[in-house]
């Protein structure tokens, strides 16, 4: 089996001021083994990115933005460009999180433009896909996710896709405490990978990390990590406290969690 990169990403959403970010890192850096031999990514709000750049240097982790606009610069009041993220050392950008798609009506076309812009500036896109409860109950979950994956990748060449990360996040599981069963999550992450194989090749699909997100906690991460197509997690609520985020990473990796 391919040894794919494991990634544990913290999506802080609209939480944490600069002062709160500093407090997080003061505690986080004291844990040995953070970020060694696996990918740890923090997605703070835009306003805390500069602070993260200054604070995260002590530990081998990456950071990124929760969103961006697809243009380099211009008359787009209120937007943030990939160049601005590059300047702040962002290695990643979250694209098409369900809160962007549902609350801010972001479309598949906008998601694709952002994916292309991220690649143009060598920022690694982490694209989120997932269905609503209504879509799941109506048997439309697979169609929706396959459509979102395909739409995000139209015109994106294989060598760029190979650098991407996908996160399957069922909307009904986000922030609700109702996490998807590990078998349902496996089925959907497997479907994402199958679609990547269909669009590109089994080889490309086999090297792309696919994460699960939606009420991941220290108590439930281990069962997801046993699934063949789940390579880590995108974590919201349970990533806000350093101890809880660290427990997730430790419980995910078991004895492979390396002390620095
Ligand atoms: P949650 O959020 O872990 O709080 O469910 C996950 C996410 O929105 O990425």
Image: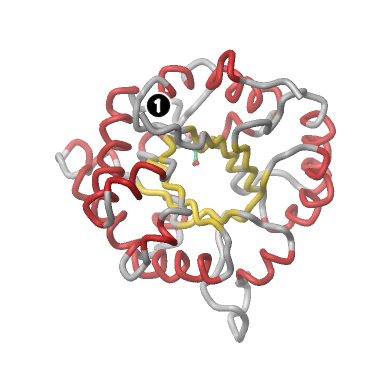
Please give the name of the residue rendered at 54% of the width and 70% of the height, measured from the top-left corner: 69
Q: Position of residue 97 (x, y in %)?
A: 46, 51
Q: Position of residue 17 (x, y in %)?
A: 76, 47
In this rendering, position of residue 73 left or right of residue 109: right
Q: Look at the image and tell me in which quarter the N terminus lies.
A: top left
The total number of labels drawn is 1
Q: Is residue 94 above or below residue 141?
A: below
Among the 4 quarters of the image, the one containing residue 132: top left
Q: Is residue 38 above or below residue 206?
A: above
In this rendering, position of residue 184 left or right of residue 233: left
176 and 217: which is toward the camera = 217
175 and 118: which is toward the camera = 118
Disc 1: which residue = 179
| Label 1 beta carbon less than 8 Å to ligand 1 | yes
In terms of secondary structure, where does tag 1 sit? loop
Please give the name of the residue rendered at 63% of the width and 37% of the height, measured from the top-left corner: 40
Q: Residue furthest bottom?
A: 75
In this rendering, position of residue 66 left or right of residue 113: right
Q: How is the image coloured?
A: secondary structure
Q: Position of residue 202 (x, y in %)?
A: 27, 46
Q: Is residue 188 above or below residue 256?
A: below
Q: Position of residue 23 (x, y in %)?
A: 82, 36
Please give the name of the residue rendered at 66% of the width and 25% of the height, measured from the top-left corner: 246
Among the 4 quarters of the image, the one containing residue 226: top left
Q: Look at the image and tell me in which quarter the C terminus lies.
A: top right
> How many residues crowd around disc 1 within 10 Å: few (fewer than 14), some, or many (20 or more)?
many
């Amino acid at each position: 089996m391919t040894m794919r990169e494991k990634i544990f990403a913290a999506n802080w959403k609209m939480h944490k001021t600069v002062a709160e970010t500093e407090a997080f890192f003061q505690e986080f850096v004291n844990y040995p083994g953070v970020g060694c031999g696996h990918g740890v990514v923090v997605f703070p709000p835009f306003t805390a990115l500069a602070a993260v750049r200054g604070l995260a240097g002590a530990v081998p982790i990456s950071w990124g933005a929760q969103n961006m606009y697809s243009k380099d610069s211009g008359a787009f009041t209120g937007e943030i460009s990939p160049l601005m993220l590059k300047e702040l050392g962002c290695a990643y950008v979250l694209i098409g999180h369900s809160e962007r798609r549902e609350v801010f009506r972001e479309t598949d076309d906008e998601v694709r433009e952002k994916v292309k812009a991220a690649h143009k500036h060598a920022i690694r896109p982490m694209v989120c896909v997932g269905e609503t409860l209504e879509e799941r109950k109506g048997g439309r979950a697979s169609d929706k996710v396959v459509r979102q994956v395909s739409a995000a990748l139209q015109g994106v060449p294989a060598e760029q896709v190979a650098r991407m990360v996908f996160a399957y996040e069922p909307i009904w599981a986000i922030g609700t405490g109702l996490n998807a069963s590990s078998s349902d999550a496996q089925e959907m992450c497997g479907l994402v990978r199958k679609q990547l194989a269909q669009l590109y090749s089994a080889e490309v699909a086999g090297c792309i990390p696919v994460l699960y997100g939606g009420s991941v906690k220290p108590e439930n991460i281990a069962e997801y990590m046993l699934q063949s197509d789940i390579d880590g997690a995108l974590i919201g609520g349970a990533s806000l406290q350093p101890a809880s985020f660290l427990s997730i990473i430790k419980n995910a990796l078991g004895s492979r969690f390396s002390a620095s």
